[in-house]
Image: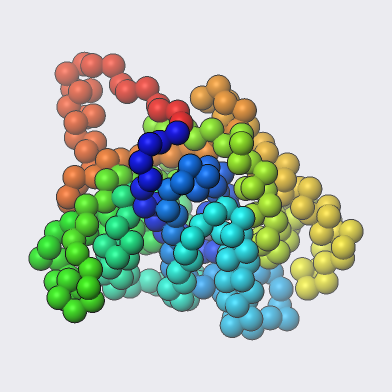
Amino acid sequence: MEAESINILAIIAHPDDLTFFSAGSIAKWAEQGHNISTICVTSGNLGTLRTDLKLDDVAKMREKELKAANDILGVKETIMLGYPDGGFIDGAKLREELSYYVRKLRADRVVTFDPWVKYEVHPDHVVVGRMAAEAGAFAAFPLLYPDQIKDRGVKPYSCSEIWLMGLLGHQPNYFVDISSTFDKKIDAALKFEATLTLIADLFAPGEDIDPANVTEEQLKKISKYAKSLLRSMAANIGRKAELKAAEAFYVQKVLPGHFDNFIQLMNEMLGNPPEKPKIA
Ligand SMILES: [Zn+2]
């Protein structure tokens, strides 16, 4: 258990992003007494296979689902920025907005997508991860976005670390044991109806489910699929750290304007053995 309570800010692109990659860790940190907030950058209004809904209906539905999921995880505040899903996000504008929130919420830890992974096609994941990491690393500079300091009542803030989530890419350097919060992760995941039908479409193609008319029986079946998918994800990641269930991250400490990975690189050049992944 970490002694001091810190402010943790999860910055995601779509309402269901947290569930898959870091919900178990979020729930654990909330139980440990840390303050957790979430910023969801887009409304997630493309996130359905249904053809009977309008973009606004989907946006409303998904915001409700995210809030219900976040209640389960112990997230105190959920902020929706309302960018269109799957669009071309103006990175400069988003970085300014996210810097404001890093300052306002005094975020010590930013959790977001790894924007440097290979073969990530989703522009929202890439742009949000990149701008969230930059906002965390630059919010300490007082001459950056001075209007926020002058007119909007925030002060520069040094975020200490960025936790990059996702399954692809970097060798993780941090594993979080989620055995005790895995059930909360499942309960939160089951709040996302559209995601569940998407999972059924991807992983149970024979099911032939009409996303607009999912029967009670089918919903039960899909929920079972989702559970076993999340369970095997957690078990597979856990195996790498000898844990029953885990989530993996690539964590970087932040110096204003930089990550501290150059220390790691220098150590490698000196021939020192690489750091072992941390487990919490
Ligand atoms: Zn997403």
* Most distant residue in the right direction: 217
Find residue 193 and report its horizontal and vertical position in percent: 70, 64
Query: Is residue 5 visible in the rendered structure shown here?
Result: yes
Vertical placement of residue 151 versus 256, above or below: below
Find residue 93 and report its horizontal and vertical position in percent: 29, 73
Find residue 129 and report its horizontal and vertical position in percent: 38, 56
Query: Is residue 91 visible in the rendered structure shown here?
Result: no
Find residue 210 and report its horizontal and vertical position in percent: 81, 68
Closer to us: 253 or 155 = 155
Query: Image quarter for residue 1?
Result: top left
Closer to us: 34 or 230 = 34
Q: Image point 27% across, 46% down: which residue?
A: 160
Vertical placement of residue 41 versus 162, above or below: below
Query: Image quarter for residue 62?
Result: bottom right
Vertical placement of residue 231 versus 74, above or below: above
Closer to us: 204 or 151 = 151
Q: Image point 57% across, 71% down: which residue?
A: 63
Q: Image point 40% across, 26% down: which residue?
A: 277
